[in-house]
Image (spheres, rainbow, N blue to C red):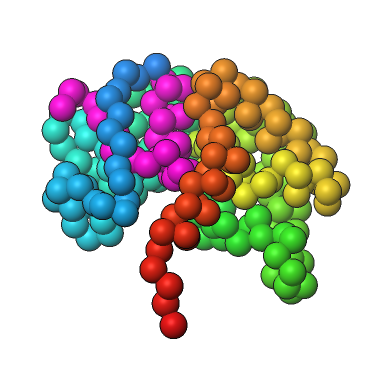
Amino acid sequence: MGEVNLVGTWVSPYTYRIKWALKLKGIAFDYIEEDLCNKSALLLQYNPIHKKVPVFFHGGKPICESMVIIEYIEEIWPHNPLLPTDPYERAMLRFWIKYAEDKGPSMWMVGEGQHKAEQNSLEMLKIIEEKALGDKKFFGGDNISMLDIVLGLGHWLGGEKLLEAHKLHRLHVWLKNFKQVPVIKEDLLDLDAMLAYLRRQREMSPATH
């Protein structure tokens, strides 16, 4: 392996987090595609606890968990920062990252047919829009921050249509701007391909009773 390597899978938003962080910083890396239906010896050896992607290698040393990896990347390569330089602003951004991480996909579960869950999801998105984004282009101001990368999960969950439908205008504009950044745009999951892949996986899975 080279100096910097990433083991991931093409459908995982957590793999893309690492790709985006490295590319925003201009760090060259080798990518190794993992088949989660037939996990490799490499994955099982270097992430024996969770047996999940992504796994990041720097100088042969493995690091797991996407946010741990991004924090490491930020420390090792501080240029093109993904966190503010001001300690208070940095703390506030980390607060919102934790909020988004704690809520996870449930933040985007509008349209799932369960009224209470939908109301909770909309409330979370409104809080993020009002308190964290405000009138900024990105959560980091004029530049993409670690929080933008984390909330990029919305692309996987149909975020653009959801935000437009529920008149979350500022978040809708943010997601469109985010997806137009060249580094993001050139490495953004094709949702139709993902859905087709997931359908095939379900069809191949043995029926359970």
- Total labels drawn: 0
Is residue 69 at all visible to an observer of this figure?
A: no
Question: Can you give x and y, in whole percent of width and height, for residue 107 in the image?
Answer: 64, 57
Which residue reaches farthest bottom?
A: 209
Residue at the spot 50% in from the left edge and 27% down from the top edge: 187
Residue at the spot 71% in from the left edge and 53% down from the top edge: 125
Question: Can you give x and y, in whole percent of width and height, for residue 154 in the image?
Answer: 62, 45
Left or right: where 88 falls relative to 167: left
Is 65 colored magenta in this rendering? no
Q: Nearer the viewer, residue 78 or 138?
A: 138
Left or right: where 78 falls relative to 4: right
Quarter holding residue 182: top right
Q: Is residue 22 above or below residue 87?
A: above
Question: Can you give x and y, in whole percent of width and height, for residue 131 in the image?
Answer: 71, 48
Residue at the spot 52% in from the left edge and 60% down from the top edge: 102
**Image quadrant for the N terminus?**
top left
In the image, the segment drawn in magenta is 1-25
Left or right: where 82 falls relative to 52: right
Question: Can you give x and y, in whole percent of width and height, for residue 25 in the image?
Answer: 41, 20
Q: Is residue 206 above or below residue 189?
A: below
Q: Nearer the viewer, residue 145 or 163?
A: 163
Q: Nearer the viewer, residue 187 or 125?
A: 187
**Image quadrant for the C terminus?**
bottom left
Residue at the spot 70% in from the left edge and 31% down from the top edge: 176
Left or right: where 161 falls relative to 41: right
Q: Is residue 90 above or below residue 37?
A: above
Q: Is residue 87 above or below residue 4?
A: below
Is residue 103 at all visible to an observer of this figure?
A: yes
Is 22 colored magenta in this rendering? yes
Quarter holding residue 181: top right
